[in-house]
Image (cartoon, rainbow, N blue to C red):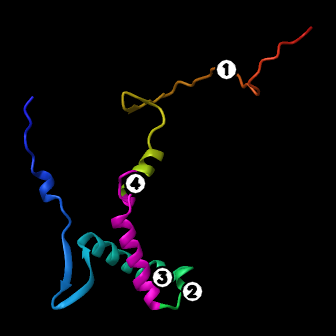
Amino acid sequence: MRKIKSYSSVWKFEKYLSSVGDLPLPLPVTFVQIAWFAGTFFAILFVFGKIPPLSYCNNVLFEYGVIPGGIAWFMSKKTFDGKRPYSWLKSFFLYLLRPKQTYAGKRVKYGKSKIEDEITIVRCYKYVPDTD
């Protein structure tokens, strides 16, 4: 068996932004972190800032700086089962919403036929025969 070299993993590195114009940032951030920060910032600004508990927060730095920064860090650095949190949540909800009865990967449709099998319910694990 001959091995073929693949260089596709060479180009999969994260690009960091260390300064904006002439202003250096305290920590280098990735573009994914910037997107999560901006998305969370605008979501708090327009949607979640008007509903409790964020509507009771009077600290502007905490509401518009710490919360979006924490969410951006959490979504870009932490992993569950080797996946990023948004990928893990997506696969979790797709698992919950999947069709329950499948055959060869397709959902089973019964149509107009009704299943009227009798079901026996057993309440205990030990069978005790009647002694008559």
- The amino acid type, in three-letter code, at marker 3 is Gly
- Contact check, label 1 and label 2, Cβ < 8 Å: no
In the picture, the disc for residue 88 is 4
Looking at the image, is mark 1 or mark 2 nearer the viewer? 2
Looking at the image, is mark 3 or mark 1 nearer the viewer? 3
Q: CA distance from mark 4 to mark 1?
A: 40 Å
Q: CA distance from mark 3 to mark 4?
A: 26 Å
Circle 3 is placed at which residue position? 49
Q: CA distance from mark 4 to mark 2?
A: 31 Å
Q: Give the residue displayed 63% in from the left and 20% down from the top.
A: 117
Instruction: Residue 123 in the image: state x and y as whole percent.
Output: 76, 28
* Magenta extent: 60-86
Question: Taking the image as drawn, is residue 43 in sight?
Answer: no
Q: Secondary structure at mark 1?
A: loop
Is residue 84 placed above or below 119 in the rendered structure? below
Circle 1 is placed at which residue position? 118
- Contact check, label 2 and label 3, Cβ < 8 Å: no
- Contact check, label 4 and label 1, Cβ < 8 Å: no
63 in the magenta segment: yes
Viewer-proximal residue among 101 and 61: 61
